[in-house]
Structures are given as C-alpha cells and as structure tokens.
Image: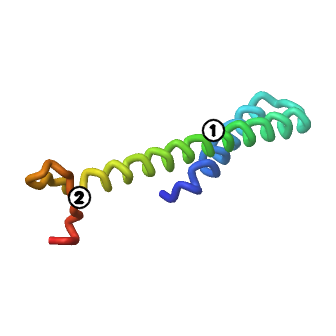
Amino acid sequence: MKRRLIPLTMMLSAGLVTAVITFIRGDSIIYKLGSLLVVFLIFYAIGSVIVMFLDHFDKVNSKEEMIEDEVIEKDADGETVGQSPDNE
C-alpha cells in the first residue's frame, strides 16, 4: 500500500464506524456531522504522524545501509582508506 493512502484509509474507516454508531443511536444530523468532522480530523492527523514516522525510519535505515556498504581498510601507516564496492 502506498503510504500516502494510510491517512485517508484511517480517516474513512473511522468515519464509517462513527456514522454507523451515530445512526444506530439515532442522534441528530448536526451531532452526526460534528462528530464525523472531529473524527475525520483526528484520524487524518494520526495517519499523517504515522507516515512521518515511517518515512523517518526509512531515511535512518537507508543511511545505516550506506554506512555498512562502505568497506574501510587500513593501510600500513594506519590511515583509513574508504572503498566502496564499486571500485573493485
């Protein structure tokens, strides 16, 4: 699933549950719409935060993979020489 769809999916799922619950309870239209708006905003914000965390974790993991891929060797003088696998 694409990450940009996570907030929308969460928001619409929570909205559906809210709509069903308010319909069963027989609440007024104004209350239904108000609660639906609040639920949409809250779950869209939660989904957006989740996507931000996932993007941040991917960025950190890709940096760690780049560091692990570098081959660091020491020459006779003790100086470090960095070689990437492309130079072989």
Quadrant placement of the C terminus: bottom left
Q: Residue 73 location, x and y as percent?
A: 15, 54
Left or right: 79, with 52 as reference point: left
Residue drawn at (66%, 47%) of the image: 12
Residue drawn at (80%, 40%) of the image: 37
Q: Nearer the viewer, residue 30 or 41?
A: 41
Left or right: 43, with 1 as reference point: right
Name above or below for residue 69 compared with residue 32.
below
Residue drawn at (33%, 48%) of the image: 64
- Furthest residue to the bottom? 87
Left or right: 75, with 10 as reference point: left
Q: Amino acid at mark 1?
A: Ile
How is this picture coloured?
A: rainbow
Name above or below for residue 19 compared with residue 82.
above
Give the mark nearest the N terminus, 1 or 2.
Answer: 1
Instruction: Residue 46: give its label.
Output: 1
Residue drawn at (24%, 56%) of the image: 69
Distance, label 1 to label 2, CA atoms, is: 42 Å
* Residue to which mark 2 is pinned: 82
